[in-house]
Amino acid sequence: MTTGPVVATPGPPESPLFRSTPKAGNRPCHENRRL
């Protein structure tokens, strides 16, 4: 599991990092939980 920006932003879902990172093969599970 490659945890890059996710570890940097474990709280704020409104972070630009999450929006910038594509949920293609980054963190589908995390994305689902955020949504």
Image (spheres, grey):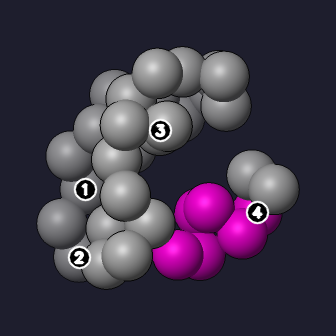
Relative to 9, does residue 29 appear above or below in the rendering? below
The CA span between labels 2 and 3 is 17 Å
Q: Nearer the viewer, mark 3 or mark 1?
A: 3
Q: Name the amino acid type tagged 3.
A: Phe
| Marks 1 and 2 in Cβ contact (< 8 Å) | yes
Return the residue at label 1: 3
Nearer to us in this view, 23 or 6: 23
Q: Residue at x 62, y 61 (%)?
A: 31
Helix, strand or loop at mark 1: loop
| C-alpha gap between disc 4 and disc 2 | 17 Å
Return the residue at label 2.
1
Measure the alpha-carbon separation of dots 3 and 1: 12 Å
Residue 27 seen in this snapshot: no
Q: Position of residue 15 (x, y in %)?
A: 54, 21
Magenta stretch, residue numbers: 28-33
Q: Secondary structure at mark 2?
A: loop
As drawn, the label of residue 18 is 3
